[in-house]
Image (cartoon, rainbow, N blue to C red):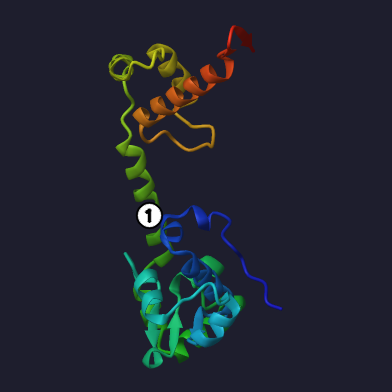
């Protein structure tokens, strides 16, 4: 039984997160079913059996999704085989012909006329990392921290009675992180959440009046 490394952060990456459920599973399946040189003999009939009937996939959509933004799948042998360059770098790092553990994979790539293609790609995994980082940076960059005055104006418009200074200080202490650990993306949406919580708490403490009796 072959053992391979797995990326514990893969589901945090924009590429993986953006895939539909069946194709997330297919991408993971490819990393397990390809040979140690990152080559998969294309067989969607068998792949579908392993993935399950509720995870329908097809070759055309798989290539479209997997190669979106960068070349993650290289077809050869008339499309009957797929080469996954990112698999090589993740499993081995930089292939070295002097390394015995790498030698077999290199021989397979050379026999398949993929060695020169792989070397010409540079670092496919680094390209993925850089793209993921850029996308994450863009998300952070889109958030502009509000001033107390901006918060106060918005709260006044909604007449919600929220203390703008307290709201600002609270999120400053938390580095503008939500309870789930994610960064605040829309501070106005967070104000509205506070507003809803305030209404909910008020309704829970409001006395119930039935006839001339008050129930708490």
Report whether 178 appears left or right of 209.
Answer: left
Q: Is residue 176 above or below residue 24?
A: above
- Count of number-bearing discs: 1
Residue 78, position in %: x, y? 37, 93
The one of 115 and 58 positioned closer to us in this rendering: 58
The quadrant holding residue 187 is: top left
Residue 26, position in %: x, y? 51, 72
Disc 1 designates what residue? 130
The one of 215 and 33 positioned closer to us in this rendering: 215
Quadrant containing the N terminus is bottom right
State whether residue 94 appears in this view: no
Q: Is residue 141 above or below residue 207?
A: below
Residue under the point 44% across and 13% down:
166
Residue 72, position in %: x, y? 40, 71
Q: In this view, which residue lies farthest toward the front?
A: 211
In the structure shown, which secondary structural element does the residue marked by tag 1 occupy? helix
Quadrant containing the C terminus is top right
The one of 30 and 127 positioned closer to us in this rendering: 30
Few, some or many residues within 10 Å of mark 1 (<14, 14–19, 20+): few
Report whether 74 appears left or right of 102.
Answer: left
The quadrant holding residue 7 is: bottom right
Q: Is residue 187 above or below residue 33?
A: above
Residue under the point 40% across and 18% down:
168
């Amino acid at each position: 039984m072959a053992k391979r490394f797995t990326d514990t952060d893969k589901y945090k990456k924009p590429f993986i997160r953006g895939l539909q459920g069946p194709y997330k599973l297919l991408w993971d399946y490819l990393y397990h079913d390809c040979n140690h040189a990152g080559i998969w003999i294309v067989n969607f009939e068998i792949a579908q059996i392993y993935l399950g009937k509720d995870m329908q996939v097809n070759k055309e959509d798989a290539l479209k999704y997997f190669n979106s933004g960068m070349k993650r799948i290289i077809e050869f042998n008339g499309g009957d085989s797929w080469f996954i360059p990112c698999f090589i770098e993740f499993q081995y790092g930089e292939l070295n012909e002097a390394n015995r553990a790498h030698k077999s994979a290199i021989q397979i790539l050379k026999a398949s006329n993929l060695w020169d293609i792989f070397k010409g790609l540079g670092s496919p995994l680094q390209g993925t990392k850089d793209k993921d980082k850029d996308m994450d940076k863009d998300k952070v960059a889109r958030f502009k921290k509000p001033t107390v005055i901006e918060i106060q104006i918005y709260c006044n418009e909604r007449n919600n009675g929220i203390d703008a200074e307290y709201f600002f200080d609270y999120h400053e202490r938390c580095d503008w992180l939500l309870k789930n650990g994610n960064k605040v993306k829309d501070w106005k949406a967070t104000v509205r959440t506070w507003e809803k919580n305030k209404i909910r708490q008020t309704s829970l403490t409001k006395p119930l009046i039935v006839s001339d009796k008050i129930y708490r």
